Image (cartoon, rainbow, N blue to C red):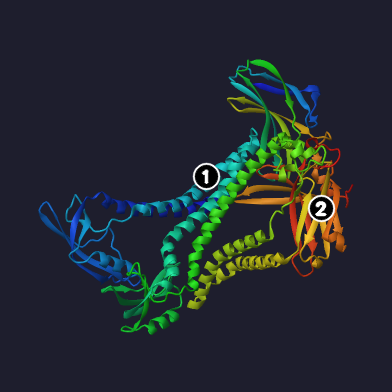
Amino acid sequence: MSDVRIELEEGRDTFRPREQLRGRLRWDLAGERVETIRLELLWHTQGKGTRDADVVETLTVENPPTRGERAFAFSLPAGPYSFSGKLFSVLWTLQAVSEPGDEVVQHGIVLSPTGTEVDLTAEADAGAAPALDRS
Amino acid sequence: MGKGCGTLFFGVFLAFGLGFTGLIVKATLRNSDAHGWPQHRCTIETSEPRDTGSDSAPYGLAVTYRYEIGGQSFTSSQIGTSSASHGDYTPVQRALDRYVPGAAVPCWVNPQNHADAILEQSSRAIGLFVLLPLVFVLVGAGGIYGVWVGSAAATKVRADRIQDTVGRKSAATAVVPAIFFGLFLAVGLGVGYFLVDDARNAFEAPRWTPTPCTVEASNVREHESTSDGHTSYTYSVDILYRYQVGGHTYRSNRWRFPGGSSSGRGAKQAIVDEYPPGRDFTCYVNPRDPALAVIQPRVGASALLFALPLVFALVGAGGLFGMLRSRGQDRRQAQSTARDEFADPARGRHASVAASPSRVASAALAAESYLPKVPGGGGALTLEPQSTPFGRVFGMLFVALFWNGIVSVFVWQLVLSFQRGSPEWFLAIFLIPFELIGLALIGGFFWSVLALANPRATVSLRSACVPLGGELELRWELSGRTHVIERLTIHLEGVEEVSYRRGTSTHTERNTFRKIEIVNTDDRRELEQGRERVTVPAGTIHSFEAPNNKITWNLVLEGEIRRWPNVSEKYPIVVVPAELGGASGSAA
């Protein structure tokens, strides 16, 4: 059984917009025939609505040796922020796909200026926003 | 259960479509058989009108003609590949004018059997009508495919690899409305094709030549139709009259334009009683085509029938045009957003505003695929409401007509059942909720008409694109009957919106997660115009747009009017991540 791992620098899982996301992709294919390993950085929705997703960055390893590793550095975009709402959430994921076979390994991250995902349910639970958020 | 209902629903479309496609193909092939026959010269021997014996189409033509092939003489009486009978006498009159005894006319002879010949080849254009039922076949087959394959694919995505869907947004969301509007256009053009001649004649008839005419026969014709085991009848006026033009005798049975039949025998009988056999009167004859005549040239209320296919065609064409236009505008806006980045800032109309972050970042905005299109490219602009007052009126009218049009068919059946003395009580009870919705839609239409008299609100922004933590500066102005407004409120709201399929239908849900009050006043001066600034909170979420999930931010303006529809407008704006706008200072 092949083993593909995604390891992020300093073990971080939370990032700010426009930061660099660095890490290493490691694999041990244990004799299985794999033609490509594709590492994708993507966001996707989760919740009541039909799922949407968008791949932002891709790293492709063609004809990988049985064992190996590859460093990667992705420039994170300005958004969308990771958030959780009453009806849907946006999640960020690093996804390594081996082809043929379509074996998938996923590693979730949080993209947010505050270091934690934006919680829309907390805003709603707090009731109406301050009446006049004026300047 | 959901898949079964979906399969049944789309299966009906597929079955109807295949059935009608088969009929049209069969008729086209049958008519095409004779198209390969060689043409010969035939001589008309006899030609006279005949009674077909049909109550709804009593007029036909009896013709005999002679031709020679290989020294052998043949006689035939076959006119076309199928026997023709008509409710309208005009085609019979035209045929009598064409097939005068002794005239030499072309005919087509079966090369396999010389005794088999025809005078007229049917048009193969009927084959084009196969396009109409093919649309139903596509909708039916596509729907069944979507029910079975689409749900399986969705399940697979949840369990396995997450695949990009945003890129497919434009194609997927455009197909369903394109089919919807395409159907309307096809039906409008198809029905209009049959009505265009009648429509032209209807509007020209008042200028035709008044001509002395004599009634030969007159009666009320009965047309039978059977539905769900019940037989119903409609009636039409059938007055056959003769007249002379240029020494030639013509006959016609046209009462008015358009023709057709309807319920109510009494009114038709009263007309027929006014035109007994032998009565002389004045009819109106087309000077360019004497075979065409009419008794009553005035266009009555029934002429509204001509407008129906036009409405269908306009709705269909308008919808398709609107879709194409909005896709073109999206492309142009994306292009102009990128061009703005490189344009000479001194030429921009907001040159007086130093360091406008939204315009500088416009190219960066274009690269963020999850953001909705920014109105006005990010610069100052007067906002357009989500829907205009006239747009709401026409929208309500369309929905009310569409809904009540369909429901009225079943209500009419119900009324007929009461008239027959065998009321369908189950249908009556079943229709109640549909009728209530129809009445509500009619009420909604009139309510939206009342709102046309409301004051108009104009809202303008320094920029329709504001970053989280940035400042939104807006101005508002009300014009018209502003004295009727008692209180004005403006607030900024953030809304989650999701859509999903359940069975065969698509559902949309919304949740307002944030509401920020900007204006709440009953002061007359402040109410009519004003200016305000508000900071968009930094800790909330920016705008987000994907095919099935959205975060939208809107400015909502409400003007309360007692005992009248409120002024209510919603203006979409775009809130971007702080990193795109520059969180320091104004959004302008």
User: Tag 1: residue type?
Assistant: Tyr
* Number of other residues with Cα within 10 Å of mark 1, as a class: few under 14, some 14 to 19, many 20 or more: some
Residue for badge 1: B145
Give the letter of the chain under mark 1.
Answer: B
Tell me residue B307's x, y (percent). 51, 65
User: Tag 2: residue type?
Assistant: Arg
Q: Which is more foreground, mark 2 or mark 1?
A: 2
Secondary structure category for the residue under label 1: helix
Give the left or right position of residue B84, taking residue A4 as reference.
left
Tell me residue B523's x, y (percent). 88, 62
**In the rendered image, the vertical position of residue B3 relative to residue B420, given as above or below:** above
Give the left or right position of residue B148, taking residue B134 as reference.
right
User: Which residue is painted at 83% across and 63% down in the image?
Assistant: B487
**In the rendered image, the vertical position of residue B412 relative to residue B567, given as above or below:** below
In the rendered image, the residue lying farthest to the right is A135
Residue for badge 2: B475
